[in-house]
Amino acid sequence: MRAQLTGTAPAAAPDEPDLGHHGDVEATPGLVDLAVNVRRAPMPDWLADPLVAALGRLSAYPDPAPARAAVAHRHGRPAEEVLLTAGAAEGFVLLARALRDARRPVVVHPQFTEPEAALRAAGHTVERVLLDPAEEFRLDPARVPADADLVMVGNPTNPTSVLHPAETLAALARPGRVLVVDEAFADTTIAPGVDGEPESLAARRDLPGLVVVRSLTKTWGLAGLRVGYLLGDASLLARCAEAQPLWAVSTPALAAATACAAPAAVAAERAIAAELAADREHLVARLAGLPGVRVAGRPASAFVLVHRPSAAALRERLREHGWAVRRGDTFPGLGPDWLRIAVRDPATTDAFSDVLAEILEA
């Protein structure tokens, strides 16, 4: 089976995947959370101290200029090529609103559902390119329609954990097209011999129409703070800013963006990514020893995608045993035989694998 191209109406049909379903719904109190891809670790002082200090400045309206400058410096861009947002999710909404004149928007799936949801909410008719699990969800740029003037793709992709080569994504860029690359999990990736984030396009200023979406939610455990940013052409980001409410990013969130752009924070990200890679290998090895369980492709991020017949029923059994994992059938291109499992420390992985083995052997 090759990648498929399908059209969808702005409103979801009854048999459409639920694009509004996210892992936090799965992680109900009392369950061990393997459904949400947010790292849980004590906050370092270099991040906690600016956040606490920011609470003393809440009487003043937020000033994004220092954080914008810090993020721009991190990625080697001028400040006008950065737009701070209330999380990556707001970035998708702003792009969908700013690009209402897009004639043929295409979303590459399976991927995070908010980009398509934002497009639909803004009145767009969305087409999908569905990647093939038999091909490990790899992307061939030729599968994207040549006349698509707005293309959205994740890298590394949620939920597949596939890391596409930078040049594969760069091949999608062309004049007259906006290429949106969701790099919310880019800081979770690592590769031998590469100092920074392998396959990231965040510093590329030579690609026409490129917009990179970034998030500080995952590695630094800031889901509740809501902070992210867009990187791209200044004129396009200015259009996005026009669609953004005043003072959309809070003073504490701006303090976090500034702190996380510092060299010490970037170095810490690399160390965390290396530790994550070892934990991911441990999870994949444990899953590989279970009957009928197949890990998709070569996972590169903070989660793995698993295929097993009747996975939907298996998910319910896991909940009965105290474990939450992410259902796969709400992602276009997947179905009820897929689950997404967050990478945790080896002890948690071992406990989960033991429970999963017991259920499968029952």
Image (cartoon, rainbow, N blue to C red):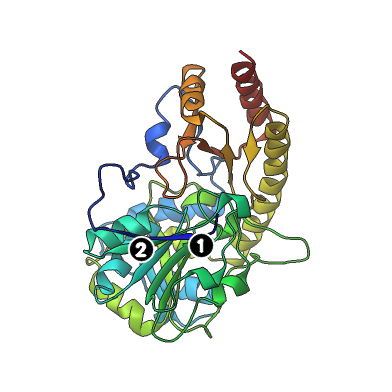
Q: Position of residue 188 (x, y in %)?
A: 60, 54
Q: Give the CA separation, mark 1 to mark 2.
A: 21 Å
Q: Which residue is located at x 34 percent, y 48 percent?
A: 19
- Residue on which disc 1 sits: 183
Q: Which residue is located at x 39 percent, y 79 percent?
A: 147
Residue 249 in sight: no
Q: Amino acid at mark 1?
A: Glu
Q: Residues within 10 Å of mark 2 (few under 14, many from 20)?
A: many
Q: Amino acid at mark 2?
A: Glu
Q: How many marks?
A: 2
Circle 1 sits in a helix, a strand or a loop, which is it? loop
Looking at the rendered structure, which numbered label has been put on residue 127?
Answer: 2
Q: Which residue is located at x 48 percent, y 71 percent?
A: 71
Q: Which residue is located at x 22 percent, y 53 percent?
A: 11
The answer to which of 12 and 35 lies nearer the viewer is 12
Residue 91 in sight: yes
Based on the displayed image, in which of its 4 quarters is residue 166 positioned? bottom right
